[in-house]
Amino acid sequence: MYDNAANWTCLPDPTKPCTDWGYPAYVINATMTEHVKAGVDFGGTVSEPRDASGHDFLGRSVAPGSLSIWMHHYDNVEFHAGSFQLDGMESLFKGDSVSCGGGTSMYSLYKETDKHKTTVVGGGAKSVSVGGYILGGGHGMLSPDYGLAADNVIEMEVVTPLGDVLIANKGSNNDLYWALLGGGGSTFGVVTRFTIKAHPTPQLQFVTFIAATSPSNPMAADIVTFLASQFPGLNDAGLRGYGFLTMSGFDMGVEGVPKEWSGIAGAFTVVDRSAQYTESLLTKLNNTLLESSNGTGSVTVLPIQTYDTFMEYFDERFDAGNCGVTTLLKSRLLDRRALTHDLDALRAALIAATNVAGMIHFYPLAGKAVHEAANGGRDNSVNPGWRSAYVHALISTSFQPFNRTAEKDTQALLEEAWEPMVQLTPGMGSYINEAAYFEDNPAETFWGDNYERLLQIKRKVDPMDHLSSFSIRSGHAHPIQGPIYSAFRTRSSFGLSRPLHEPRAPHYPRHNPKSLNMPLFGKSNKFKANPPKIRVEKVTVSRSASKPPATSAVKSAVPSSNRSLGSNSARASPKPASLRQESHSPYPSSSDERKRKRAVKTPSARASPAVVERPAFDKDSDAEEDDGWLTLETRKRQRKAREEDSSRQLKNERSFEDGYGKLEYIHAVDVASLECKCVPVMGATEDDVAIELQYPCLGPREKFQLVWAKDKIDAVEASTRIVQLIAENYLNEAEAEPFTNQSAGLIRRLEKASNRNVQDLNGFKAALEEYNRTLLDLVEDGIIAKNLENRHELPRHLVAFILDQIYDRTVAPSVELLSKYENGTDYVYGELLHPFISKILVDDLKMTSKQVMVDLGSGVGNVVLQAALEIGCESFGCEMMENACNMAEAQQKEFEARCVLWGIQPGAVRLERGDFRKNAVITDALKRADVVLVNNKAFTSQLNDDLVRMFLDLKSSCKIVSLKSFVADSSYNINDVGSTILDAEEKTYPEGYVSWTNAGGSYYISTRK
């Protein structure tokens, strides 16, 4: 819909440039399910946008160089009168329904159902297809009566990313059914058929009104605020539709309304009520307004028109909207509390938004049926904010095409203008189908509490992230972006294939009334779409720190395929997603991490006091993993799982001493090289395959070769990611500019040179060498050390990356040795994965660097090393399996060297061999321990009995984390002693948190009495 969503690569205006750069390389014209399945099977890990009508505010319907499945002609419609047999269920759906192909337009669906004197909940644009509209939730004029479009779907046929053709309803594939309805278009599969409830077509009263006062009225802002506060009551009384709110409106050509006005206007309907009822409703509003405004405000009502059917109304009042504009927008769902509780705060939010955008699109399209949908058995994954919302509000601003400065300024203006509205609506979020692609926290904004379950389902149905250009990923979530942005991982500068030669023109925000493609007044209205004159009223808005998410928005990244641990192997070898490495590590590898983040870009758009002017080590929220191609100043602070541990010192003194120039560690070239049967990439030859990489220390650069092989370190991916991490976490905004500049920064140059369509070896190596020199200068000037001195904790994605480096160089090359154990004995191997450990140590127990952690049965040492790095605490481990012990010791040695490379001081690590029941070091450590972790899932009953007796020596309040309870109850009966000395709390972990199964499960935190 928006030109900027495709990088202005082919504008509708014939006088403007047009290239095919921003569009798919291949397109499948799908008219049957077999076509879709063939496309999914062929696509593999190629970006696969699905395009039904292209009506997408987020630009997801196109992607350069991709395979596109065009659903536009998959538009068959079949009406079911009286009942419908649900697949896999004995019971019938009783009532009328309609089945349609995934590319069916709303207008076609309306016409077919009208033949049977019925209609469906649908969108307002004739060309919109059912697919993305329904899967994002789907609001419409009938939503207050029948719920959102997603609430009305009773069955779907879907082609999953793995190529399976499934039927999803409440009885079959229920999780997929739940996720599809609200989780976003083509994130969990390509829906080829919807079956939707059909409702008796209603009679509608259509009314246009303008509730207004003069902008010169000193009470104008108060009157506008009062009018906004009336909409929950008006919606409850039956009013719904498309309106807008302004502090300085344009000439509407309506008698009795001044050319300039402040108020709310729009086109609304009342369903199955008389014209007299509608008139009385607005008369009451007018009387209330007159009283509240001391006679300075009034409601002007145009003649009410009655339509006997929804189709009659739609044909008359809705027309094809315009596309081909250059626009950005922000949106928010507003509940009763936001609109009525604090009118001063509401007033400030309305002024701030209209000062920049001119008007707020104000759509009361929720109401009773939307609120009651979940209670009525129509549970799905749409944003929970809909269940209390009354108004869907949006602002938009156009800007000059091909002008990156204007784009950046516009985004900054919108974000600043909309922030008071965000603060006014905690936990409400936005409607994903009409939202900003530059949302900082999409998990919270679009799905709230539903996100965790969505993520689990995504990991199950799309473990390899085949549908890779959307915002829910098997590894993590990331800010919404169109596939164009996905290709270059930016948000504000979209990585054009050619430079912009047009001169930078001054930017003046312009409101474009048609930019949202929303029908405000219909074909026959007299309203004029002239830009309003912006009335600026200064208002001071108290801005607190960024609002924390209502829940932990994003779990830490996990491997992009849910690796299971079978009885014959310690780790199942992952399926290759592409010609890129996928690590065996329990942490996200450099390759996995980057594949998950390829779509994410963050603009330097917000000129506000919240800019990051220091190293961002305090950002330990999982949502930090969303940030991808980084610009420091836009990053909002995320909720902390614990208070900052001010006693921890991150700076590793050894990293900045000249004597560590000969530091020994395993270079990438030692495990991934031509000698290891890898193949060169980027056109490199044996003579020029070598590169080196500087770390934030005075230690030696790491040696890489530009090669690839399955399950090997990918130098291109790894080196670019390291540059990103250092720019993000070690430098302030000014210091990071040479790295993050979105037109000529080092990260941009590395990504452009390594792009599969460019493959510029010399350019890549030149950018890398410049990075090496720049970083070394920062180290030698003491800037890195000084920045580290002021920080006290590490973000999780940096912890994961460092641990991943260690694992890939020590354990992964010989991981098959861990499979040599005997089931049913104490010699059984399995791992708790990185997100699980962070959840336990940081979120649950809030450990600090002054505490002691002991891991009984520590395997290859993953937990011990993670605790020492992430928490900075003293960490002990003990393992009796020889192969695991050997790998643990190798990991510890590499860990110590890598911490020097990264300039980070970890906690002390002590790894012991042998039986922890007989180890003196462990016995002493247990007496001091604050946390004891034991993965006793597969321990024998005798070993669990022995453990309980060992816990007698623990100090009071020590926490014991286990996968099997030590406190006897009806389910578990390890030892009665446990009930005497321990208080236990059962918790649950989701899918993908342990190595031996994809399923979630229970774990226990016991406290020593």
Image (cartoon, rainbow, N blue to C red):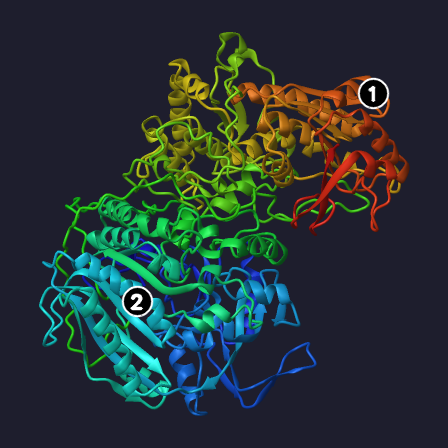
User: Residue 923 vs residue 848: left or right?
Assistant: right
Query: Hey, which quadrant is residue 570 in on the image?
Result: top right
Where is residue 35, by image quadrant? bottom right
Q: Is residue 33 left or right of residue 274?
A: right
What residue type is disc 2 on? Gln
Residue 676: x and y in percent read 64, 32
Front-most of residues 280 and 989: 280
In the image, which disc is placed on residue 230?
2
x then y, percent, for residue 549: 47, 46
Give the spatial CA distance, label 2 vs label 1: 72 Å
Please indicate whether residue 621 sits to the left or right of residue 992 in the image.
left
**Residue at (83% x, 44% y) in the render:** 968
Residue pictured at 51% horizontal, 31% vertical: 643
Residue wearing tag 1? 919
Q: Residue at x 47, y 51 (%)?
A: 444
Looking at the image, residue 639 sits to the left or right of residue 920; the answer is: left
Q: Which mark is residue 223?
A: none
